[in-house]
Image: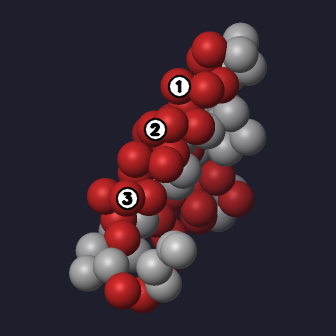
Amino acid sequence: MMQPFAASPNPTPRLQQVLDLIDRVAIAQGRDVPQIVEIERLRFLPTGTFGRTWANFLNEHNLQPFTTGSRRK
């Protein structure tokens, strides 16, 4: 029986394990694709553009976009 998600004291490592597994399966099936968004490049766009605003938002809130999994790239 599965334990409730909230029962885990720190679900982040488990989530990363799942995302890593998805990556390995995608590679094995030939469905791996390059990342479509490079946040570092967005930081150099002009102020007021969507990409620059998104990059700034991620920085301000200490967030990282998903870069794993064939559907997240």
Q: Residues within 10 Å of mark 2 (few under 14, many from 20)?
A: some
Q: CA distance from mark 1 to mark 2?
A: 6 Å
Question: Colour scheme of this structure image?
Answer: secondary structure
Q: Between residues 51 and 58, which one lies in front from this camera angle?
A: 58
If you read the primary sequence from the N terminus, does the residue marked by circle 1 or circle 3 appear first?
3
Mark 3: secondary structure = helix
Q: Between residues 73 and 23, which one lies in front from this camera angle?
A: 23
| Quarter residue 26 falls in | top right
Query: Disc 3 marks which amino acid?
Result: Arg
Q: How many marks?
A: 3
Q: Residue at x 59, y 62 (%)?
A: 54
Q: Where residue 16 sits: x, y (%)?
A: 40, 51
Q: Which mark is residue 20?
A: 2
Identify whether 16 is placed above or below 60: above
Q: Residue at x 61, y 26 (%)?
A: 25
Q: Is residue 40 left or right of residue 1?
A: left
Residue carrying label 1? 24
Q: Residue at x 44, y 58 (%)?
A: 15
Determine contact: label 1, label 2, CB under 8 Å.
yes
Q: Is residue 11 visible?
A: yes
Identify whether 67 is placed above or below 51: above
Identify whether 39 is placed above or below 5: above
Q: Is residue 43 left or right of residue 33?
A: left
Residue carrying label 3? 14
Mark 2: secondary structure = helix
Q: Where residue 20 sits: x, y (%)?
A: 46, 38
Mark 1: secondary structure = helix
Q: Between residues 21 and 36, which one lies in front from this camera angle?
A: 21
Q: Where residue 34 sits: x, y (%)?
A: 63, 22
Q: CA distance from mark 2 to mark 3?
A: 10 Å
Determine contact: label 1, label 3, CB under 8 Å.
no
